[in-house]
Every structure is written in structure tokens, then in C-alpha cells.
Amino acid sequence: MSATKSWFQPIDRVAIALIFVLSLLIGLLVWRGDIVAPKVRDFSWQARQIGASDRSFSLTFSRPMNTNSVEANLQIDPPLPGKVSWAGRRLAYTLLEPAPYGATYRVQLRFARDKFTPETDLRRLLQPFEATFSTRDRAFVYLGVEGEEQGRLVLYNFTQQKKTILTPKNLAVVDYKLYPHGDKILFSASDRQNRQNHNPQGLLSAQIYTVTTGISTPQPDRTHWFSFLNHQQVPSPGKIDLILDNKDYQNLKFDLSPDGNTILVQRVSQRQSDRFGFWIVRPNSPPQEMETEPGGDFLITPDSQTVAVAQGQGVAILPLQADAKKPLEFLPQFGMVLDFAPDGTQGAMVRFNSDYTRSLFLVTNQGVQRELLRTTGSILSAQFDPRAGILYCLLTQLMQGNTYEEQPYLSAINLKTGKQTPLVVLPNQRDIQMSLAPDGLGLLFDQVVTAANANPSPTLPRTEQGQAIATSHLWLLPLPETINADLTNQLRPEQLPLPGFRPRWIP
């Protein structure tokens, strides 16, 4: 009689044994709980260099977290005030104001726990997390007035204490605008040889160029390795590209959109002097003439889609497109736009009154128009503070006497209360340019000395009124975090050892 045949083959017995062991392990894990500690999977600012426009970072966790324990233990050194919001396993930290430039920050998170772990269980605390990020170097650009810098763009890096001449000797720079990341500068310049030869067309023959600064463009969506690779490919400073020539048209004033993709230029035909208007220049496209009425001063809005133009007896808001015959909005009571808030919700505009005074108005996108001040002097410029509701203004007041004389001064206006705080009286001159730092912690301004000679050299740089500049000094006014009445005429500007004019901070 044959032996009874086994119901299980060897492979079946192995499989049953494995199932039993795995079931035992699973049961053990369920009984003891998950002892793998949670961790931070991604930090959006890891090893990045940020600017004033970067206002929030995110931390993504490996599992849902106890939000109170995370918020209580999150540390940033030096401190950066902000507010926290959550979306599942992702924490977003939004800064209340731009991070100060020229600094490195450390982010730490320890002793946080996940959503399901009791406070007494110390086995599943978050794996300690630490990372760093930095802000851009504190740097600015100016036009040189002396020696080899005369008429050339110069970049000065405060953080590195380094100066770089950007434009070549053969070009005399007339005006310039900074690209949003500071990696390039848009500028107009004429050939220096034309000026030396006393060519009357020398100052009217400006062409428009770009020049690289050597500052890297941020790459927020790339990994750290790719960001490093991209940084190595950044062009060295001083690379020039011609954007718009002067063969058929004279290039006058111009502006650059906040996103860096659109250039708007006022041009007049070389053959028909009555053909005067705006031209739109975009990458990889031929220049387009705008079909609209000629205008005066203009400023592209923060959304980069429209432009505010002094047109007729008011300010017209025009679409940035070739067919812009009909304004989107017309503000007949204003004659000039000085600045827009970065978010585009507010604008600073000037009204010229019938009693020969001037008024500075705050105009919102909700239709509110509020007068901030009225003066018998001039309202030269204004800039919104990126940190809080402050508008910094460059104003003048009429001096007492038999001759007409204006005294310039810097002032800060609290946009909530409307209170004006004079900050510092400036040298007695009209052609002053100011620039507010992107982190709101400093104001640059110049002090121009015009040539006393009745027939100055044609190679000398010029003011906006066409006067020859013999020399010019640059000043830095450090700004406190809080503006109040105690600061009236108490702040002390510092003269920089850099002869130049028209200073502008790198964004």
C-alpha cells in the first residue's frame, strides 16, 4: 500500500511560514505603533538667495503634524517676523516685511511631533531639521562723473566692498533702468566720439542697450545642484547687447516693465519731426508702434500690462499693446504719476492746482483719492516703503526772500494717519535723485555740482535739465524700522566716497 500523499508541497510550506512571520510582524507594529520619526522632506528656500519680492517659504513634512508643536518650535535666526498657514502636510511661512539684505539666515525645527503622537511619547519626535538661506548682497548702481568712470555705469557692492565698471569707455550713458532680479541693466547711451566732436546731434543719438551685472538670476523651482550649475553659467559683468538703434528714430525716454519683459520707448522720427509716439519692444519680436496720442511722462504699472501716461489734461491708463487708442481709464484731475505700490493697489500722483500749489494724492484701485499734502514748492519724487505703509517723498519748500529759491528735503508720510515727518534737509539744488533700498532700510541720494564754465566740455555728463555736471556726491541715509515725529531732522546722512549721480539700488 502506497504512502499517503502530502497535501502541501515544500513551496507551500515556505509560503505559509512567510505569511505567518509577516503577520506576526505586522501585528507587532500595530501593537507598538509606528516608531519611525517624522521629518522635513522639503524646504523651499534651501541654500537659496532671496530678494525683497520673495515673501514666503514652505516646509513639507513626511506625515501630518501637530501644528501647535511645529509653530512653537520653529526658529529663524536672525529673527524674521511672519505668519503661519497650513495646507495638509505643508507649512507656509509668510514674512511680514522683506528680509534685510546682505545676511544669512538659519532655520531650525526640533521637538515637534506628528498629529497622532501623544506628548508623552518621545520616540517619534521630528528628526532635527536645520537649513540656511541668504538675501542678496546690498548693492547699487550709479553714473560716474570723474576719471575713467565718467559717463559710465558703475556697480558698487556694499556687502563685498567691491566696485565694478559695467559699460565701455566709448558709450556715454544717458539714463538706465534695472531688471527685476538685478542681473541686467537697460540703458540708453550715445557715442562719446560724437560728443567730443561737438556734434549737435550727439546727445540726441542715443541707442538702447542691456548690460549684464554678474548677479545670478534666482532659480526657485530647481534643485540645489541645478541652481549651482545655473549660477556658473551667469554671464560675467559688462556683456553689452544692442536693443534698439537710432537709424530711423531718436530714442528719448523709456521704461522697463516690472516683470522685465516689456520696454516702452518714446521715439521721434529722424525724417518727420511731427511723428512722435510710443514704441513697444519685447524679446524676439520687432518693435511695435503704439496707436495712441502722444504723451509726456509715463510709468508702467506693477502688473506689467498697462502704462500710466500724462496725456492731455490728465493721466491715461493705456494697455501695453499696439492698438491702444482708447484708455482703460482716464484721471483728469492729475498731471503726473510718481510711483506705484509693489502690489499695484495704490499709486502716488500729483495734482497741479489752480492757485499754483501742488498736491500729492494717494489713489487706490478701489477709487479712493486722498490728498496727503499741498505745497507751494515742488513734489519731485516719491517711493512706497516695501516694509509698511510709508511713502518717502522728495519735496521742496519756497525760501523767503526776493529771489525764487526752493529748499529740497526728504520726508516720510504715514499712509494710515496722513502724518508727515520731515527727515533731513538736503543741499540747495533742484536736480536730486533718490532711491529707496528694496528692504526699506536706506535711502540713496545725490548732490550734483554743475559746471561754472559758460562753455563746458561736451563730454561732461548732464542733468535732466541739460546742465553739465562738474562733479557729484552720493549720500546714504540709514532708515529706522519705525518712523515717528522724534526723527524730525535727527537722521544724519553719510557721504559715500564714490563720486557719482543717479544712484539706484539693485532690486
Image (cartoon, helix red, strand yellow):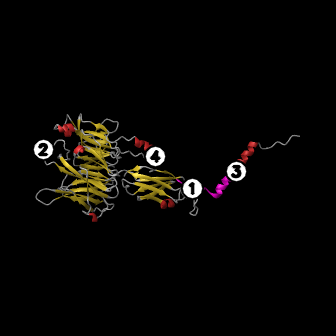
Q: Residues within 10 Å of mark 1 (few under 14, many from 20)?
A: some
| Name of the residue lying farthest toward the right | 1
Q: How many labels were placed on the picture?
A: 4
Q: Position of residue 137 (x, y in %)?
A: 35, 50
- Per the rendered image, the range of residues in magenta is 22-39
Q: Amino acid at mark 4?
A: His
Q: Residues within 10 Å of mark 4 (few under 14, many from 20)?
A: some
Element carrying mark 2: loop
Camera-side residue of 342 and 114:
114
| Name of the residue lying farthest toward the bottom | 486
- Asked whether the viewer can see residue 96, the reply is yes
Camera-side residue of 237 and 258:
237
Q: Earlier in the sequence, mark 4 or mark 3?
A: 3
Left or right side of 120 for 280: left
- Asked whether the viewer can see residue 206, the reply is no
Asked if disc 1 and disc 3 are in contact, CB closer than 8 Å, the reply is no
Q: Amino acid at mark 1?
A: Ala
Disc 2 marks which residue?
A: 455
Element carrying mark 3: helix
Magenta highlight on residue 484: no
Disc 1 marks which residue?
A: 37
Instruction: Quote the CA–CA distance across marks 4 and 2.
Output: 57 Å
Q: Amino acid at mark 3?
A: Val
Instruction: Quote the CA–CA distance across marks 1 and 3.
Output: 25 Å
Disc 4 marks which residue?
A: 224
Instruction: Quote the CA–CA distance across marks 4 and 3.
Output: 43 Å
Left or right side of 124 for 138: left
Disc 3 marks which residue?
A: 21
